[in-house]
Amino acid sequence: MNYEAAKHFYEREGHLQVPRKHVETITVSGNGGENQEPRELRLGAWVGNQRSRAPTLTPERMEQPSEVGIRWA
């Protein structure tokens, strides 16, 4: 879900230089795709945590954030 929030932010802003306290609101599907509900995700904290954990992440775990423009250094 955090990846989806990062993708949403990137598509809107064109970058992933997310302020640490930024909260991104995304809409997720509920039962059978009928119920739509908003979710608030602490995207800034997630991006910062991903960057700080980069040396320990597997290449697979780095792939999705890299696709939406995360800068690792």
Image (cartoon, grey):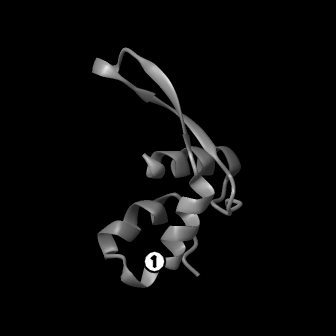
- Vertical position of residue 36 compared to residue 4: above or below: above
* Residue 34 position within the rendered picture, expressed as x and y whole percent measured from the top left: 36, 14
Per the image, the residue denoted by label 1 is 53
In terms of depth relative to the viewer, which is nearer, 49 or 16?
49
Report if residue 69 is visible in the image.
Answer: no
Residue at far top of view: 34
* Residue 47 position within the rendered picture, expressed as x and y whole percent measured from the top left: 56, 63
In terms of depth relative to the viewer, which is nearer, 70 or 32?
32
* Residue 3 position within the rendered picture, expressed as x and y whole percent measured from the top left: 45, 52
**Residue found at x 49% / y 69%:** 50
Amino acid type of the residue tagged 1 in the rendering: Arg
Q: Quadrant of residue 70?
A: bottom right
**Residue found at x 47% / y 66%:** 66
Q: Is residue 45 left or right of residue 20?
A: left
**Residue found at x 61% / y 51%:** 10
In terms of depth relative to the viewer, which is nearer, 60 or 55?
55
User: Where does the N terminus fall, quadrant-wise?
Assistant: top left
Report if residue 65 is visible in the image.
Answer: yes
- Vertical position of residue 30 compared to residue 17: above or below: above
What SS does tag 1 mark? loop
Count of marks, rendered view: 1
Dot 1 alpha-carbon crowd within 10 angstroms: few under 14, some 14 to 19, many 20 or more: few
